[in-house]
Amino acid sequence: MVSSLSWVKNATVTCLILVLGIVVGFRYAVIGELPLGIRAAWFQQLLQKSITSQSTNGSPAAQAGLTRSALDQVTGQKAPPKTIQKKVDFDLFWETWAILERDYIEPEKIEANKMLDGALMGMTASLDDPYTMYLPPKENERSGEDLAGSFFGVGMELGYVEENLAVVSPLDGTPAHKAGIQAGDLILHVKDAAKNLDEDTTGWSLTKAVDAIRGQKGTYVDLTLYRKGENAQPFVVSVQRDEIVVKSVELFMVENQGKKVAHLKISRFGERTESEWNEAVKEILANKKQLKGIVLDMRNNPGGFFDTSIELASDFLAKEVVVQQKSRLTTHEYRGNGSGRLKGIPLVVLVNKGSASASEILAGALRDDLGIKLVGEKTFGKGTVQDRRELSNGGGLHVTIARWLLPKGGWIHKEGIPVDVESKDDPETKEVDEALVAAMAQLP
């Protein structure tokens, strides 16, 4: 099974980052502000039915505070959505709940909030879209903290390859990167003695994977990996966890043929990216006369905020289309804001198979609108947009709301964006980054 995997064409990734949380092309909304049927006002009726049909003395539902008055405070509509009214009989839900409360052999394991979380996770999982998911309050809080850019972890982004847990990309300088873990590695088994964990990852959710691989600073986790290649065999890597502080934008001035090249690295599109980007742009403009050009490096960039990719693209474009968003009913074009601060400076874009989502939006816009060359490896291929909705219980709903298309209309989902010049850094040559050298060679 493992030997038949195809990393690029068959990858389906939920960009749930072990150290970054979820950054998969988010657009933000608050659940109470958007009447999209997700507000779950129908729980008002359902919970009332459960509570009135059972004894509330010590029942998990009552202990969890699942009462009509509590639901009234967070729901503005008194009836379920029409589709639910017509097609779904929720008596089955409460019938199952009641049987579990009454007959399950270990009643101490019955926790109403966990049961509700499980129902919501099952609801989203039924859509067979790994990017649409419900996060319970704890995981949702962690996701928000991660996007801020400071966290604990091993430093790699997770996804799936043909339903196998896999590394989308290790983050530069993190324990995972230092341990030699590479994009495309399959994670077959996780062992952590301190957690009394020793399991294969078959059937694991990304949430379970995050919980298993994360841990306290200084502790170790053993990962059994598989890397495709000749005579490939599973191997074990022991990684020591550490605090991860990732700067999303870094600028290095590199000497090339007697002139400076601005090596501009974007590792993700998070909350601090725009402010860090603005600082880098100021330094580039201060050195503009000495510059041969810019290498925009988005290797192993899993993406992030949809809007941020548009803002960054605006510094290279005028008011051209950056990306098209095609939702259920409409198609909307997002254009550059006209800032164009870096417009006219020679540019090359460096990507690889770990470049996904928002990084593909930026790379694709520069290629389609300006004819900029892409160097490195074909990108990952994630062409959908998610909204991150904050729910009333502190949980979060990440829901796919649209496809995004390149300026010329191409949809790269599961296909990726091909490069003009193929090049890959050789990890054995520590002093030389072959892909960066290849990219600089494309500057005029």
Image: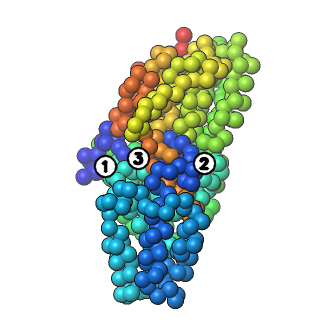
Looking at the picture, which amino acid does disc 2 mark?
Leu
Tell me the CA gap for discs 2 and 1: 27 Å
Looking at the picture, which amino acid does disc 3 mark?
Val
Say which residue label 1 marks: 162
Quick check: 228 above or below 296? below
Can residue 125 be seen here? The reply is no
Check disc 2: other Cα within 10 Å, few if <14, some if 14-19, many if 20+. Answer: many
Residue ID at (64%, 43%)? 271
Can residue 3 be seen here? The reply is yes
Question: Between residues 66 and 207, which one lies in front from this camera angle?
Answer: 66
Say which residue label 3 marks: 13
Looking at the picture, which amino acid does disc 1 mark?
Glu
Tell me the CA gap for discs 3 and 1: 10 Å
> Where is residue 150 shown, x and y percent of the image?
65, 51
Which comes before the other along the chain, label 2 or label 1? 2
Question: Between residues 364 and 394, which one lies in front from this camera angle?
Answer: 394
Can you tell which quarter of the image residue 151 is in? Answer: bottom right
Q: Secondary structure at mark 2?
A: helix
- Which coloring applies here? rainbow
Residue extending furthest toward the front: 78
> Where is residue 334 shown, x and y percent of the image?
52, 28
Residue ID at (53%, 57%)? 396
Residue ID at (69%, 15%)? 288
Question: Between residues 216 and 413, which one lies in front from this camera angle?
Answer: 413
Q: Secondary structure at mark 1?
A: loop
Say which residue label 2 marks: 147
Q: Secondary structure at mark 3?
A: strand
> Where is residue 195 shown, x and y percent of the image?
51, 71
